């Protein structure tokens, strides 16, 4: 039977293509960037596990502090920062600013996690160790205004927030397959899920609280505030007016046996969420589900998939 695919890109143009009959067509594998970030991998070495000498020295604090909301919301939970030192090596060798934007410049100062209590409350419902972990970089950046956003999101959703990933230094980010300019390296990104609301609602709340980019994935929502002014305590002054383009996103719709799949490109924070809907000829909904693949039910005349809440692909099924 013939199948015609209609493509809707929510932020772009509408394209149509005929991909022919549906038999055993396999689309290209979508790279899983690993940004589910399960934490230390089995071969991760903690200080003391290696034969290499461990740097136990403590840098002298700079004159700058980063002051967070704190348990009492007073904004007076302040951490001393240390100046960047080239001796830290490749872990902090940041790439050249993405598209030349100063929003992607390397931090000047960091939190030294060796001298910090991971249980310190940076906000009523978030502790330091949720957002900055030594295994992901002894020297860390997490911007204070983002903690405020996270607490506001927690207050609005009314339930627990599980943080999958906060700050990651350059080496750790590369090790989990993160994009070379991932905002996790700049301290204004979070991968998370909620114990009170679904991923779709959580992402919508992120947008309501000014997130510059929201990505919807199988297991979490990625929210970052890439467009907000960088915290001067970490970065110094001067924000570039250079706008940074959104990621280029695309998806295909192909058959794998009797199932439809939607290989996707451009989502650099893991596998995007795929939401499927099958409709009868009269437009009534026969079934809907989320997942990586979908088998159209009997009587389906049309199938639609929304990939990462950004790209819509739709196929009309011929009778029989």
Image (spheres, grey):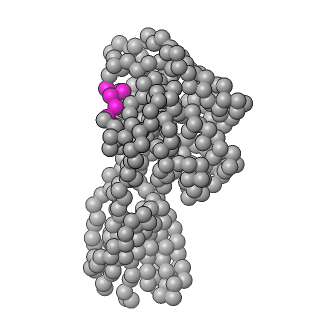
Judge by depth and name the residue closer to the eye, 42 or 17.
17
Quadrant that contains the N terminus: bottom left
Q: In which quarter of the image is the C terminus?
A: bottom left
The answer to whether 33 is drawn above or below residue 135 in the figure is: below
The image shows residue 125 at horizontal and vertical percentages of 66, 37
Number of numbered markers: 0
Q: In this view, does 7 lie to the left or right of 39?
A: left
**Residue 150 falls inside the magenta stretch:** no
Q: Can residue 293 be seen in this view?
A: no
Q: Give the residue displayed 49% in from the left and 35% down from the top.
A: 230
Is 179 situated above or below 311?
Answer: above
Relative image position of residue 191 (x, y in whole percent): 50, 44
Range of magenta residues: 90-95
Q: Residue at x 40, y 13 (%)?
A: 55
Left or right of 297? Residue 93 is left
Viewer can see residue 254: yes
Q: Which residue is drawn at 38% across and 18% down?
A: 85
Front position in the image: 236 or 196: 236
Q: Is residue 212 above or below residue 125?
A: below
Residue at the extreme right of the image, as rendered: 72
- Residue 48's place in the image compared with 208, above or below, is above
Viewer-proximal residue, 168 or 205?
Answer: 205
Residue 289 in the image, given as x and y percentages of width and height? 51, 68
Percent x, y of residue 247: 37, 53
The residue shown at (33%, 40%) is 100
């Amino acid at each position: 039977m013939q199948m015609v695919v209609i493509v809707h890109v929510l932020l772009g143009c509408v394209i149509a293509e005929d991909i022919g009959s549906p038999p055993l067509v396999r689309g290209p594998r979508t790279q899983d960037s690993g940004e589910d970030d399960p934490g230390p991998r089995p071969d991760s070495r903690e200080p003391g596990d290696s034969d290499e000498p461990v740097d136990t020295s403590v840098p002298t604090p700079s004159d700058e502090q980063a002051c967070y909301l704190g348990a009492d919301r007073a904004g007076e939970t302040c951490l001393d920062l240390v100046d960047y030192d080239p001796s830290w090596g490749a872990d902090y060798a940041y790439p050249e600013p993405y598209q030349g934007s100063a929003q992607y410049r390397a931090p000047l100062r960091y939190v030294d996690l060796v001298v910090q209590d991971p249980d310190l409350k940076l906000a009523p419902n978030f502790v330091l160790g949720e957002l900055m972990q030594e295994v992901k970089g002894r020297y860390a950046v997490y911007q204070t205004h983002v903690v405020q956003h996270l607490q506001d999101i927690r207050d609005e959703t009314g339930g627990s927030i599980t943080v999958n990933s906060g700050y990651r230094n350059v080496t750790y980010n590369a090790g989990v397959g993160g994009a070379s300019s991932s905002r996790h390296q700049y301290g204004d990104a979070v991968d998370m899920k909620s114990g009170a609301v679904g991923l779709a609602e959580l992402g919508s709340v992120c947008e309501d609280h000014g997130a510059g980019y929201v990505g919807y994935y199988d297991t979490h929502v990625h929210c970052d505030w890439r467009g907000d002014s960088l915290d001067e305590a970490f970065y110094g002054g001067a924000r570039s007016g250079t706008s940074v383009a959104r990621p280029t996103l695309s998806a295909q719709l192909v058959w794998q046996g009797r199932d439809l799949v939607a290989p996707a490109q451009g989502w650099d924070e893991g596998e995007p969420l795929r939401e499927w809907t099958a409709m009868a000829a009269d437009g009534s909904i026969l079934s809907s589900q989320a997942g990586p693949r979908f088998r159209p039910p009997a009587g389906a005349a049309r199938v639609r998939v929304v990939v990462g809440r950004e790209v819509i692909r739709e196929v009309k099924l011929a009778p029989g």
